[in-house]
Image (cartoon, rainbow, N blue to C red):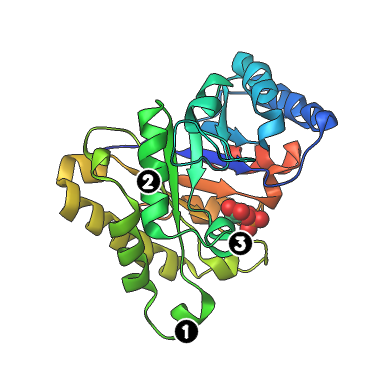
């Protein structure tokens, strides 16, 4: 099996003002003070801070990512942001299909796939999010729900272009609850099997699968050591440099 360098991405969501760059500076200080982190580190701030995060993070190896992009390259879409604009601001990644956008903006798998295609077209690496609701988990359909979301959300272009999958159970996001180690292992194994089936073993094994949903300093080491967990997508705990660095160091 290919050894994938783990990736830890922080999703600041709709949090952060100019003074939040102090937190980024502190993260950079922590990351450069000791041994170099074993993880690829990405921070996805609100769009207003993207260029500043990209510029400020460059010297310490912190990469920048967007939180969403439009499917079109430009046009009459007031308030939206194109993938090319994120790249122009210095982003290398973009989150697409986060459950908060699927729920709050009624985004469908088809739209998520189109966004991922737009991101790839702009030279970005999409982080494609999928996740089951609590009702779906209770009904025993979590694995089939995720398989269906992945089949429809991942573009065929994944065969030649880098992208990342993030498994984020909806009921674990921002709640402090996480699935058991066994449940995470089973879901990530099932996602891996689906990727291998669709893209062949070499390509399917080379796609990172992140876990997201209440990853915190106290549980990161355990979660990150599960087979087929190739990193984490971190919300709340990415807002404080100290906490985010503890998670990065848990790799
Ligand atoms: C997220 O929003 O992607 C997330 C995982 O949030 P939290 O870590 O706060 O649960």
Cα distance between the residues tagged 3 and 1: 23 Å
Q: Earlier in the sequence, mark 3 or mark 1?
A: 3
Q: Quadrant of ligand 1?
A: bottom right
According to the picture, the residue beneath numbered tag 1 turns out to be 138
Residue 23: give x, y in percent of width and height: 78, 32
Report the residue at 45% width, 43% height from top.
Answer: 127
- In this rendering, does residue 39 appear at all? no
Circle 3: element type: helix
- In this rendering, does residue 74 appear at all? yes
Residue 51: give x, y in percent of width and height: 65, 22
Q: Earlier in the sequence, mark 2 or mark 3?
A: 3
Residue 3: give x, y in percent of width and height: 31, 37
- Hey, which quadrant is residue 105 in on the image? bottom right
According to the picture, the residue beneath numbered tag 2 turns out to be 114
Cα distance between the residues tagged 2 and 3: 18 Å
Q: Is residue 112 above or below residue 137?
A: above
Q: Nearer the viewer, residue 190 or 45?
A: 45
| Mark 3 surroundings: few (<14), some (14-19) or many (≥20) residues within 10 A | few
Report the residue at 35% width, 54% height from top.
Answer: 153
Q: Is mark 3 within 8 Å of ligand 1?
A: no
Report the residue at 37% width, 46% height from top.
Answer: 114
Mark 1 vs mark 2, foreground winner is 2
Query: In the current view of this chain or complex, which residue is farthest to the front?
Result: 76
Residue 90: give x, y in percent of width and height: 56, 21
According to the picture, the residue beneath numbered tag 3 turns out to be 104
Q: Nearer the viewer, residue 140 or 32?
A: 140
Left or right: 67 in relation to 47: left
């Amino acid at each position: 099996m290919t050894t994938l360098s783990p990736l830890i991405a922080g999703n600041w969501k709709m949090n952060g003002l100019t003074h939040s760059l102090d937190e980024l500076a502190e993260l950079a200080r922590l990351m450069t003070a000791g041994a170099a982190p074993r993880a690829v580190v990405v921070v996805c701030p609100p769009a207003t801070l993207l260029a500043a995060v990209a510029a400020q993070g460059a010297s310490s190896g912190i990469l920048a990512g967007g939180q969403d992009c439009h499917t079109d390259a430009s046009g009459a879409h007031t308030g939206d942001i194109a993938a090319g604009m994120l790249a122009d601001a210095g982003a290398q990644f973009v989150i697409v299909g986060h459950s908060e956008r699927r729920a709050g903006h009624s985004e469908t798998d088809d739209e998520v796939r189109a966004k991922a295609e737009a991101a790839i077209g702009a030279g970005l690496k999409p982080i494609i999010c999928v996740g089951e609701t609590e009702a779906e988990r209770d009904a025993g359909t979590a694995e089939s729900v995720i398989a269906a979301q992945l089949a429809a959300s991942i573009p065929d272009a994944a065969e030649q272009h880098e992208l990342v999958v993030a498994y984020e159970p909806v009921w674990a996001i921002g709640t402090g609850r996480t699935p058991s180690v066994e449940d995470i292992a089973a879901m990530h194994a099932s996602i891996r099997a689906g990727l291998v089936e669709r893209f062949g073993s070499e390509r399917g094994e080379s796609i990172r699968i992140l876990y997201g949903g209440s990853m915190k300093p106290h549980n990161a080491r355990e979660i990150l050591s599960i087979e087929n967990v190739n990193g984490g997508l971190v919300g709340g705990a990415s807002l404080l440099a100290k906490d985010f660095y503890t998670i990065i160091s848990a790799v």
